[in-house]
Image: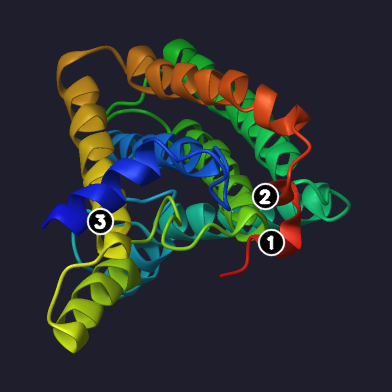
């Protein structure tokens, strides 16, 4: 248990000389953000995920089977916009060899997109009587932002911190424990990633249920801005952990 807690702590507060520098806590902040955004999209935009594409593929199957509450159009909008965001992120970050700058560039783009989505729903609130176009536009903007974020995660490449999908993270944590018979530091990082995603979903759901729609997206946009500001210093750093090829492990 001590190693588990140490692994979680050193992910949130890296030691000097950590091979990933300050990137892990920044990715944890974006994991919280992902949970918030998926809670907002599912509860407010109509049973669709904009960060978790595995869920959307399943939802698309539900919709094609005629399950009530699921929309083929909305699921496809989210999937296609996410793909577009991932492509955009890949193009944007391809020439960036500094991991801190890659994170900063992606988060700045994400902040603009989340701010645009917050403004959109503030001006055109989504409701059961809202037009499909307004709901789907908000879905597309959010999925675009999450696609950019996931492209950045692939570039930054900090093990076990994907910011969105935690199925493999949970599997790895407990498969390794089953194999070795003990909890290790890496399991702490993995479980912390799961908990931060759940915490983000809790906050996002609370905002949807008890705040305005503008606030439900304005708070994640503000968190993205804070993460961007926190990424400025790492983007200026010149250290071994900044090189992209050092992130593979």
Q: Is residue 211 above or below residue 99?
A: above
- Which quadrant holds the N terminus? bottom left
Alpha carbon of mark 1 to alpha carbon of mark 2: how far? Answer: 6 Å
Q: Is residue 190 left or right of residue 143?
A: left
Q: Is residue 54 above or below residue 179?
A: above
**Residue 207 in picture, x, y percent from top left:** 23, 21
Q: Residues within 10 Å of mark 1 (few under 14, many from 20)?
A: some
**Residue 146 in picture, x, y percent from top left:** 53, 46
Q: Which residue is mark 2?
A: 241
Residue found at x 16% / y 23%: 209
Q: Quadrant of residue 41?
A: top left
Secondary structure type for disc 3: helix
Q: Earlier in the sequence, mark 2 or mark 3?
A: 3
Alpha carbon of mark 3 to alpha carbon of mark 1: how far? Answer: 22 Å
Q: Is residue 9 left or right of residue 183?
A: right
Q: For the view shown, which residue lies furthest in the right direction?
A: 95
Q: Which mark is residue 188?
A: 3
Q: Which residue is mark 1?
A: 246
Contact between marks 2 and 3 (CB within 8 A): the answer is no
Residue found at x 63% / y 47%: 148
Q: Residues within 10 Å of mark 2 (few under 14, many from 20)?
A: many
Count of numbered circles on the image? 3
Q: Nearer the viewer, residue 170 or 4?
A: 4
Q: Earlier in the sequence, mark 3 or mark 1?
A: 3
């Amino acid at each position: 248990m001590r190693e588990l807690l140490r692994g979680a702590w050193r992910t949130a507060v890296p030691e000097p000389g950590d091979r990933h520098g300050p990137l892990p806590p920044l990715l944890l902040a974006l994991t919280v953000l992902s949970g918030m955004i998926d809670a907002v999209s599912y509860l407010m935009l109509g049973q669709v995920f904009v960060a978790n594409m595995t869920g959307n593929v399943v939802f698309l199957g539900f919709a094609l089977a005629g399950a009530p509450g699921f929309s083929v159009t909305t699921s496809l909008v989210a999937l296609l916009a996410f793909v577009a965001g991932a492509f955009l992120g890949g193009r944007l970050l391809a020439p960036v060899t500094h991991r801190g700058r890659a994170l900063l560039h992606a988060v700045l783009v994400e902040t603009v997109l989340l701010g645009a989505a917050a403004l959109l729903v503030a001006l055109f609130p989504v409701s059961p009587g809202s037009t499909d176009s307004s709901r789907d536009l908000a879905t597309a903007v959010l999925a675009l932002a999450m696609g950019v974020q996931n492209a950045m995660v692939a570039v930054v490449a900090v093990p076990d911190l994907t910011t969105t999908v935690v199925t493999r993270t949970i599997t790895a944590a407990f498969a390794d424990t089953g194999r070795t018979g003990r909890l290790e530091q890496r399991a702490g990082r993995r479980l912390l990633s799961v908990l931060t995603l759940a915490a983000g979903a809790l906050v996002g759901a609370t905002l949807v249920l008890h705040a305005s729609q503008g606030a439900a997206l304005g708070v994640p946009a503000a968190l993205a801005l804070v993460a961007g500001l926190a990424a400025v210093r790492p983007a200026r750093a010149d250290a071994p952990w900044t090189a992209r090829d050092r992130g593979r492990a």
